[in-house]
Image (cartoon, rainbow, N blue to C red):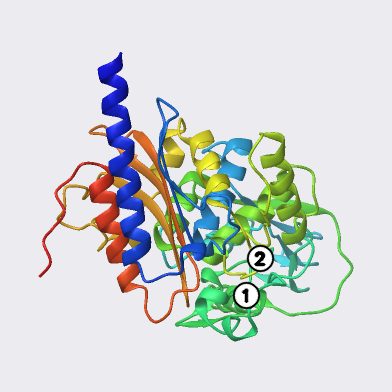
Amino acid sequence: MALCLLISTAICAIAQQAVRDFVRESGVPSGSLAVLVVDIAKGDTLAAHNISAPLIPASIMKSVTTASLLQHIGPDYEYHTKVYTEGEIDKGGVLHGNIVTVASGDPALNSHVEPTGTDIIAEIAEALLQAGVKSVEGRLLVDDSVWSGPSVPAGWARADLSRDYGTGIHALNFENNTKGSSSVPDPTAIYLGRLRGALEVRGINVQGKTLEGGKRREILDHVSPPIDEIMRSLMMRSDNMMAEAMLRTYSKETGGDGSTADGASRGMALWKRRGMPMAGVRIDDGSGLSRSNRVTADFMGSVLRDMSHDVYYASFFPLAGQEGTLRKFLCDTELDSYIAMKTGSMTGIQCFAGYKLDEDYAPTHIVVIMANDIQGNNGRMKKAAAKMLLRLFGCNVPSER
C-alpha cells in the first residue's frame, strides 16, 4: 500500500510539473489558462490549474450543446420536413390551392457537406407528378412556425454575420444557408426559387395567385439523416449553424419555444440539475461563436465525465493527427489517434476539450485545456499544450528542431 501511495505521489508530482512548465512555456498569462486532466475510472485528478476560472470557451461549447440534446433524444432522432397540397386537384391536373412546406429546423436540408441526405426539391417534384398535378393555381409557401426568436444569437459579432461561419439558423434551412464563403440571410427565398424552377422544368406551372388555404394533404415527409450523423459532422468541422440547430432543437424537444435564449436557459438548468459546478458558467449560444459565453474547466470536465459512457458522444470528437480540426495536432506522436478533442479558437483564444482513449477508442481520461488573452497567433500555446499532454501520459516528447 505504501509503495502504491509513493508511486501515485510521484506521478502527481510529475504531472503538476508538466502543467507548471506548460503555463510558463505557453506565453499566456497564468490567470487566463486552465488545465484539467482526470482519470475517469479512478476519479483521480491527474493535473489541474485554475479550474474554477470562467473563460471564453469558443467552439468547445459545441461539446456541451451536443451533450444536452443527445441525452434527451438519443442518436436516432430525425427531422421531418413535411410538404402538403392545399385545395383540390381537378381532373385536368390543376391544384386549386397552394403547396406548403412545413419547416422542421433540419440543418442538413440539401446540405453541401456530410451528411447530405436526399434532395427535397426532386422529391417534391416527383410527389406532385405522382399526384397528377400539372399546374398550381396558388403559391409556394413555407410554414416556419416551428421555432421562435431571431435566427442569429444576440451575442454574435456583426462582422461575422456576412461570413459562412456566421450564418443564421432558421426554421427552413437550405444548402447550409451559405453561398461560397458568404452567409445567406434568407434561405427560404433560395429554397422557393429553386423549387419553382424545378417544377417548371418538369412542366408544372405555378400561377402564384393568392388563395385561401384549403384542405391539406401530405404529399411528402422528407426525413433527415439521424441526429448522430449531424452531430458528428458539426463536431468534426466545427459547424456553427448546425450547433445552433441543436440548441434550438433542445429547446423545442423539452417543451420550449425553440429560441436560442430558451435553449440556453434550459441547458443551464439541465446541467445544474445534474449537479455540475455552475459557478461562473454562462451559456449564450450553442456554437461558442458568442464571446459572452463563459465556462470553467471544472464544468467542462464534469460534463465530459457525465457523458464518457456514451459511445456515440465520444465518437463525435476528432482524433488527434487524423480528423477534422485536430488533424495536425499531435500528428506522428505517440498520442496520434489516442486523443479525441473538440477544439475552440478565436482571436486570442485556444481551447481543447475531450478524452484520452485506449486501444479500443474508449475514454480513459478527461482532458480540458483553455487559454484566453493570447497575444499573437496560437501556435506557441498549441505547441506547449501538445508537449504537456505527451508528458502527462508518459510519452516521449519530440526534441526541438
- Badge 1 amino acid: Pro
Residue at mark 1 = 187
Residue 101, image x, y percentages: 70, 62
Return the residue nearer the eye: 256 or 351.
351
- Residue 109 is at least partly visible in this image: no
Q: Is residue 323 left or right of residue 228?
A: left
Vertical position of residue 208 compared to residue 277: above or below: below
The answer to the question of whether label 1 and label 2 lie on touching residues, with beta carbons closer than 8 A, is yes
Q: CA distance from mark 1 to mark 2?
A: 7 Å
Q: Nearer the viewer, residue 249 or 307?
A: 307
**Residue at (43% x, 79% y) in the render:** 375
> For the point 56% across and 41% down, which residue is it?
70
- Give amino acid for label 2: Leu
Between 173 and 204, the one nearer to me in the picture: 173
According to the picture, the residue beneath numbered tag 2 turns out to be 172
Image: 114 above or below 306: below
Q: Residues within 10 Å of mark 2 (few under 14, many from 20)?
A: many
Q: Quadrant of the N terminus?
A: top left
Q: Residue at x 33, y 59 (%)?
A: 22
Q: Picture coordinates of residue 84 (x, y %)? A: 72, 57
